[in-house]
Image: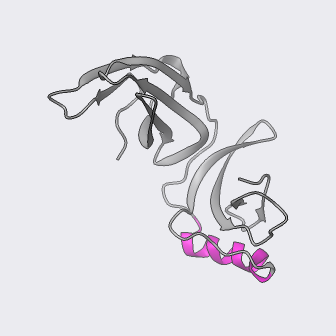
Amino acid sequence: MPLTSRSSVFWTAGGSATSGRVVQFDLGERADDDTQLMLDSINETEGLTYYTFRQIVSDVIVQGASVKLIVDADGTAICAVASLKSSLDIQLPEKPELTTEDVERIVDKTVGSSGYSIVKGLTHQAVVEINRTNRLVWVVYTDNPREDQDAGFFTFYVNDQGSCWTMRRS
């Protein structure tokens, strides 16, 4: 569930809404009008809590775009860092041409015979920057069947025409 729209992020840290503190920061020009943030992870270490929010535009994840909020043990925000993308200059379709099942079949057909297994439940659409151009693609994760490489899993991308590729290990 996305938290908010462009103008401000409100987050209650430290316990419940009544016992915590409200943190507000302005996303400003770094976010498009339909930008929303979704809580992605919460990590605690050495008395600090690290909240990471993903940027969502029109219900699509923007790969690599996030807001990180660090809160101390008292619930006071001590740092906020944003790496949001603006002016995505792509048209997001109302309904994807391919389904999750279609995309996973394409990846399985491409690499399944090499021992890769798709990690179910993680496939999603995302805006990814490729050669300085934002592209809407499907993201599919597989395990790593090769013991000679230290990556825990691989990331594959599929476009709406059904082309499949990988750019990096995860």
Q: Residue furthest front?
A: 46
Q: From where the camera sits, is residue 99 visible?
A: no
Question: Relative to 43, is 170 above or below?
Answer: below
Q: Residue at left 73%, top 67%?
A: 144
Residue 7 locus on image (x, y percent): 38, 22
Residue 18 locus on image (x, y percent): 14, 29
Question: Relative to 93, is 26 above or below?
Answer: above
Q: Is residue 102 magenta?
A: yes
Q: Residue furthest bottom?
A: 113
Magenta region, main secondary structure:
helix
Left or right relative to 164: residue 92: left
Residues rendered magenta in the picture: 97-113
Closer to the camera in the image, 105 or 51: 51
Q: Residue at left 37%, top 42%?
A: 2
Closer to the camera in the image, 73 or 104: 73
Q: Residue furthest right?
A: 148
Q: From where the camera sits, is residue 51 visible?
A: yes
Query: Image quarter for residue 145?
Result: bottom right
